[in-house]
Amino acid sequence: MPLRPPANALRIATVDMHTGGEPLRIVTEGLPELDGRTVLVQRRFFREHLDHLRTGLMFEPRGHADMYGAVLTRSADADFDVFFLHNEGYSTMCGHAIIALTKYVIEAGLVDKLEVAFNVPAGRVEARAQGGAGQVVRTSFRNVPSFVYRRDEELRIDGFGSVRFDVAYGGAFYVCVDAPALGLELSSAHYARLIDAGRRIKRAVMAALPIEHPFEKDLSFLYGTIFIGPPADPNHHSRNVCIFADGEVDRSPTGSGVSARAALHHARGELAANETITIESILGSTMTVRVVERTKFGPYAAVIPEVSGTAHFTGHHEFWFDPQDPLVNGFILR
């Protein structure tokens, strides 16, 4: 006899995936209707009225401290609108999610083409899948304009002394620092130390430096710390470890993060137009990035990065939200 959900339980279905090891939980059924014609308005409505579903899906016991999610809806002027969930709240852009979502919407038959347009909180993102017979083997996407916000800044940070850093935007704002200069090793064995360092640096930069998106107040915040170091594979350009939200460690190289880095390297003369580099994650999984266009974004000289990577399905779920469960909205331990 099939197991029945508790009486009056809300049922939410998801498809779970990963891109380079970074999880993505895509909500496919069960959400109440979202009020709002744009993705930013939908995200604001969700945050104000349905945030308990974010915590219920991301936090334990259904998720964990590093879970990541996406809410996908049909769009008036793109193929889909999508916003993103994590342990602290809501992202402005997510490259690993776009890579996975493109595979999902094609293989689930939601679109009958290989080019997919998404409206994300940061703007419009154009993705293209490689594959055939309904199977996606790799996805590339052209990101929103990415730019350098601050270069060659320096700040005293507790535990590290004077730290040099840059701030760059790739759909979200990141503080970029050189890991070897801080004595940090970008490996899973140093996971806890990287979280602590990422939090310290992010808090210090937020306190010292106003972060202002040129057009949208909702995007004006520092999202994470990116540690940059040498690759384990000498055929790759570098290794990228991003500590974002409330101490989440991205298992992938971070699609919006490598976009920010492409803008930074291009501004320094270290990455030519249409030159492709491969960047590793903490697991050794990779994404490639190249600058495909130069542009302006408000007062900033910007680039359009193209990021490429692979995603895989891990399963699907139907979660039950039992109103009698005292932990129905989730909890988190770090």
Image: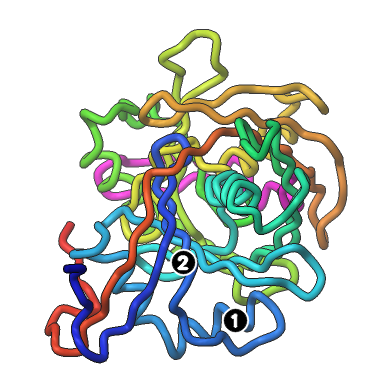
Q: Is residue 326 magenta?
A: no
Residue 256 seen anywhere in this rendered image of the structure: no
Amino acid identity at mark 1:
Gln
Residue 265 position, x and y percent, is: 67, 31
Residue range in magenta is 142-168
In the displayed structure image, the side of residue 41 where residue 243 appears, left or right: left
Residue 203 position, x and y percent, is: 37, 60
Tally of numbered discs: 2
- The label number, if any, that marks residue 27 in the structure image: 2
The CA distance from mark 1 to mark 2 is: 14 Å
Instruction: Give residue 105's quadrant in the image.
Output: bottom right
Q: Residue at x 29, y 40 (%)?
A: 194
Residue that protrudes farthest toward the front in the picture: 1
Residue 65 seen anywhere in this rendered image of the structure: yes
In the displayed structure image, the side of residue 234 where residue 212 appears, left or right: right
- Mark 1, secondary structure of its residue: helix
Give the color scheme: rainbow, by chain, secondary structure or one colour.
rainbow
Residue 48 position, x and y percent, is: 46, 88
Give the residue at mark 1: 42
- Mark 2, secondary structure of its residue: strand
Judge whether 278 appears above or below 171 on screen: above
Instruction: Give residue 20's quadrant in the image.
Output: top left
Q: Residue at x 20, y 64 (%)?
A: 60
Query: Closer to the N terminus: mark 1 or mark 2?
Result: 2
Judge whether 119 appears above or below 328 on screen: above
Q: Residues within 10 Å of mark 1 (few under 14, many from 20)?
A: many
User: Principal SS element in the magenta part?
Assistant: strand
Amino acid identity at mark 2:
Val
Q: Residue at x 36, y 28 (%)?
A: 283
